[in-house]
Image (spheres, grey):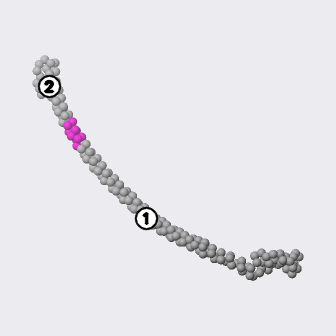
Amino acid sequence: MHRLGTLLGVCYEAGPDTLKKPNNGRRMLQIEPELVPTLVMMVPFLVALLALHFILFRPLFDYMEEREQVGGKATEEAERFAAATTEKLEKLEQLLIEARLEAGEIRSAARGKAQEEETAIIAAARAAADAELDKALAEISEASKTASNTLKTTGQSLSNEIAQQVLGRPVAQS
């Protein structure tokens, strides 16, 4: 038997009993590990694994868990703030709608009052204009009567004068 060497506690030997023929006709090397060197090599690995667990992995996992919890709390708080903001926004929108309705009612009332005042002012102006017109018509009528009487008397006196000049004698007034 020929010894090939030891690697990680595994002994490699080549010999007629270690080579087997598989189904395809080739010979394969059969490797059998030794227990003691394998266990001795596993001890530093397990110690390093435990050290990494306590030094690196546990703090890392704790940090990640804490970060996840903080993130979850922040998310919950953000959702609460969003809900509160949405609720306040809805209340403000409702107040704005009510204020717009109230402003519309005030405008309508003011418009109605202004129209009533306009109607009253126009009626008063018409009444004053009608009174002025009646007064002017009365003055015109009086002036017309006065002018008519003046023309009548002036016409009679002129006709008497013309008749006297044409006839050359005084005419009796009738």
Circle 1 residue: 88
Which of the pair 67/131 is nearer the observer?
67
Secondary structure state at the residue bearing disc 2: helix
**Which residues fall within the magenta stretch?**
131-141
Which of the pair 118/105 is nearer the observer?
105
**Residue at x-position 15% and y-position 28%:** 153
Q: Is residue 10 magenta?
A: no
Q: Does the magenta stretch include residue 139?
A: yes
Please say if 2 is above or below 151. below
In this rendering, position of residue 30 left or right of residue 170? right
What's the residue type where badge 1 is placed? Lys
**Residue at x-position 27% and y-position 48%:** 121
Labels 2 and 1: the sequence-earlier one: 1
Whole-percent x, y for residue 77 in the image: 48, 68
Q: Nearer the viewer, mark 2 or mark 1?
A: 1
What's the residue type where badge 2 is placed? Ser
Which of the pair 173/141 is nearer the observer?
141
In this rendering, position of residue 123 left or right of residue 74? left
Report the disc number at residue 49.
none
Whole-percent x, y for residue 48 in the image: 65, 75
Give the position of the C terminus as an image quadrant. Answer: top left
Circle 2 residue: 157
**Residue at x-position 16% and y-position 30%:** 150
**Residue 174 in view, yes or no:** yes
